[in-house]
Every structure is written in C-alpha cells, then in structure tokens.
C-alpha cells in the first residue's frame, strides 16, 4: 500500500467518524480514479430510515452516472468496512474496479457480537462471494482498531 492509498483509507475512517457524529452508523468511503485522485466521497446516511443509503452504494450510483465503463473499471473504492452484499452487488453490476477496505465483515460481525448487537437482516457475506470478479484488498490492522472504536461508541450510546 502506498501513501495515496493510506491517505484514502484514513479519509474513510474520518468519514465514518463524521457519520457517527451525525448520529449514523460509522461507515465512510472514497472513490478514486485510476491515478489515485479522489473523485467522490460519502458516509453512511441510514439514520433517516432508508437502510440502502450506504456510501459504497451511493458511490456506485454516482460512478454509473458520471464515469465511462473504462473509467469505472480502473477506479478503486476505498472504504472503512468491507462492502455488504448489497453494495458488493452494486459495485459488480456497475463495473467498478478494485475495493480496498480497512475492516472486514468478519471482524465487524465479531465486534458486534461482543457488544451484544443482534445480527443484521442480511447475511454479511464476503465481497468475493457476491462479486467474485472484483479485486479485493483488506483488512488493514493498522487502522481497523480505529474503526472498531467507532462501532463500539455507536453501539454503546444510549
């Protein structure tokens, strides 16, 4: 991982913190082009009741509307947490390139179980099971503990 990629992953963690500060679940993502330039970023926005407002899904929609197929194929989505099945499917259908995530779905599942959080209504499958043709990198332990702390804070808030 180079400095540009690490900067994007750190920004994802910052965006997850911004989501948490706004009363939302802590997830954040950055879409970068083939040269590593950040094109768009977003954070979780599910607190309003629409559980599909994940940043990875929003970035896939934006990419479909604003990038050519070749540009999408060369792009990378950096994210604080591994894509859920819905977001992995959107990523695959839109034809985006690789995914780089800080923490895995397996890690998140373990963290939430430790906190006594009920299982979600959708099974947290790994990206490779949903979109097997997508190149995936992660997790990155050097940042994962920060993501874990955000989830701990979110789920311990009364």
Image (spheres, rainbow, N blue to C red):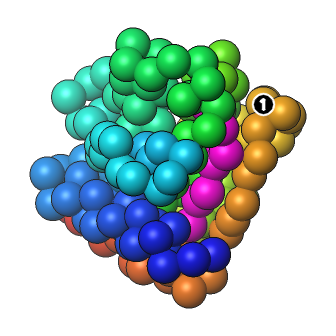
Residue 157 position within the rendered picture, expressed as x and y whole percent measured from the top left: 24, 65
Is most of the magenta stretch helix, strand or loop? strand
Looking at the image, is 34 positioned above or below residue 142? above
- Residue that label 1 marks: 131
Image: magenta residue range: 96-102
Measuring 67% from the left and 69% from the top, which residue is drawn there? 139
Q: Nearer the viewer, residue 134 or 3?
A: 3
Tell me: 148 left or right of 130: left
Q: Nearer the viewer, residue 30 or 44?
A: 30
Looking at the image, is 86 positioned above or below residue 112? above
Tell me: 125 left or right of 101: right
Q: Residues within 10 Å of mark 1 (few under 14, many from 20)?
A: some
Quadrant position of residue 14: bottom left
Looking at the image, is 45 positioned above or below residue 101? above
Quarter of the figure with the C terminus: bottom left
In the displayed orientation, state which residue is furthest to the bottom: 142
Tell me: 155 left or right of 104: left
């Amino acid at each position: 991982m180079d400095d540009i990629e690490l900067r994007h992953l750190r920004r994802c963690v910052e965006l997850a913190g911004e989501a948490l500060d706004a009363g939302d679940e802590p997830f954040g993502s950055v879409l970068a082009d083939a040269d590593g330039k950040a094109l768009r970023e977003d954070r979780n926005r599910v607190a309003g009741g629409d559980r599909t407002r994940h940043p990875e899904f929003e970035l896939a929609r934006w990419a479909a509307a604003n990038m050519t197929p070749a540009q999408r194929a060369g792009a990378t989505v950096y994210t604080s947490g591994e894509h859920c099945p819905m977001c992995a499917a959107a990523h695959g259908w839109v034809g985006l390139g690789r995914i780089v995530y800080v923490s895995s779905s397996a890690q998140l599942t373990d963290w939430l179980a430790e906190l006594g959080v009920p299982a979600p209504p959708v099974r947290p499958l790994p990206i490779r099971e949903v979109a097997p043709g997508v190149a995936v990198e992660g997790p990155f332990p050097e940042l994962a503990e920060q993501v874990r702390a955000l989830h701990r804070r979110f789920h311990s808030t009364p």
